[in-house]
């Protein structure tokens, strides 16, 4: 008897993923529709409801599928590489020159399989070894939005990492491993500088899947981060 019940539940779950009832669809007639669209409590209640039953079943099926793909991340971490030459003396040059210590990040984007870009909506900085008065490009908001730096130091438009970290989020859009997404990072300036990339649950941390060899403009497939 126990074996019979288990097989029954598996059968209903599989049907939910394939058929997912549309609200008001002609086939959504009471118990039948409900059995295809969802599982568990929602389905049983919907059994006597006709059209209402179809809506309940669809919702249940979608929720179950989303929960199953939990490998999602809300932020990107960029860590300056301590070997970058401009970190020496925090890029202090001749009088009047602009200081941009470390890798210079113009923009960070998520590119999906359809080639749509979502650019960072919010970036914050942390752990800089070069302080704000040693860095003329210390504002992380310069790394939000689409690329806009010209490459000339005096034009700005980028965040110089200053020996520390920067965390960027994307207006609530998630980075999802297994979905073919690509990260594009625009590092600009007269010198090609190095940085590391990681995925984080949020810009407050909990990071994993680091890639430690990026430099200049880089394109990184999310699924290949280790
Ligand atoms: Ca620099
Ligand atoms: Ca920018």
Image (cartoon, rainbow, N blue to C red):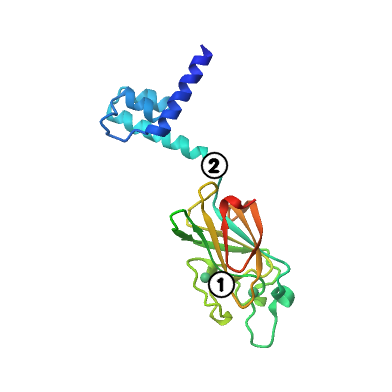
Q: Quadrant of residue 183?
A: bottom right
Q: Secondary structure at mark 2?
A: loop
Point out residue 33 in the picture as x, y percentages from the top left corner.
33, 27
Count up the numbered dots: 2
The first of marks 1 and 2 along the sequence is: 2
Name the residue that disc number 2 marks. Answer: 70
- Looking at the picture, does residue 151 appear above or below residue 74? below
Foreground residue, 201 or 118? 118
Is 42 placed left or right of 214 in the picture? left
**100 is higher (above) or lower (below) than 18:** below
Q: Which residue occupies 70% across, 71% down?
A: 84
Q: Residue 135, relative to residue 222: is it above or below?
A: below
Q: Name the residue at the left extreme.
A: 26
Observer-nearest residue: 54 or 195? 195
**CB at mark 1 closer than 8 A to ligand 2?**
yes
Q: Quadrant of residue 192?
A: bottom right
Instruction: Please give the name of the residue rendered at 49% of the width and 15% of the height, measured from the top-left corner.
Output: 4
Q: CA distance from mark 1 to mark 2?
A: 33 Å
Task: Determine which quarter of the picture holds residue 219.
Answer: bottom right
Q: Position of residue 200 (x, y in %)?
A: 60, 52
Secondary structure of the residue carrying tag 1 is loop
Label 1: how many residues lie within 10 Å, few (<14), some (14-19) or many (20+)?
A: many
Q: CB of mark 1 within 8 Å of CB of mark 2?
A: no
Residue 24 coordinates in the image, percent (x, y): 27, 34
Residue at the far top in the pictured view? 1
Residue bearing mark 1:
158
Position of residue 117 in the picture relative to residue 131 (left or right): left
> Residue 191: horizontal and vertical position, in percent?
64, 76
Question: For the point 45% across and 24% down, which residue is it?
Answer: 11
- Residue sitting at x 30%, y 22%: 48
Dot 2, crowdedness within 10 Å: few (<14), some or many (≥20)? Answer: few
């Amino acid at each position: 008897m126990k074996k019979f019940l288990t097989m029954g539940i598996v059968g209903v779950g599989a049907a939910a993923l394939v058929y997912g009832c549309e609200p008001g669809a002609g086939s959504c007639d009471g118990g039948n529709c409900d059995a295809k669209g969802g599982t568990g409590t929602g389905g049983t209640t919907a059994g006597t409801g006709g059209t209402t039953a179809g809506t309940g079943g669809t919702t249940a099926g979608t929720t179950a599928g989303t929960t199953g793909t939990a490998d999602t991340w809300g932020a990107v971490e960029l860590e300056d590489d301590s070997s970058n030459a401009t970190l020496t003396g925090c890029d202090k040059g001749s009088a009047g020159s602009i200081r941009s210590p470390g890798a210079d990040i113009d923009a960070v984007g998520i590119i999906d399989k359809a080639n749509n870009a979502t650019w960072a909506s919010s970036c914050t900085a942390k752990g800089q070894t070069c302080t704000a008065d040693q860095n003329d490009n210390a504002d992380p908001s310069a790394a939000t939005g689409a690329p806009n730096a010209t490459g000339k130091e005096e034009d700005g438009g980028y965040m110089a990492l200053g020996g520390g970290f920067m965390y960027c989020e994307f207006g609530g859009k998630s980075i999802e491993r297994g979905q073919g997404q690509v990260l594009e990072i625009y590092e600009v300036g007269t010198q090609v500088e190095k940085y590391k990339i990681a995925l984080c649950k949020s810009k407050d941390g909990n990071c994993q899947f680091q890639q430690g060899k990026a430099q200049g403009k880089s394109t990184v497939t999310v699924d290949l981060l280790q």
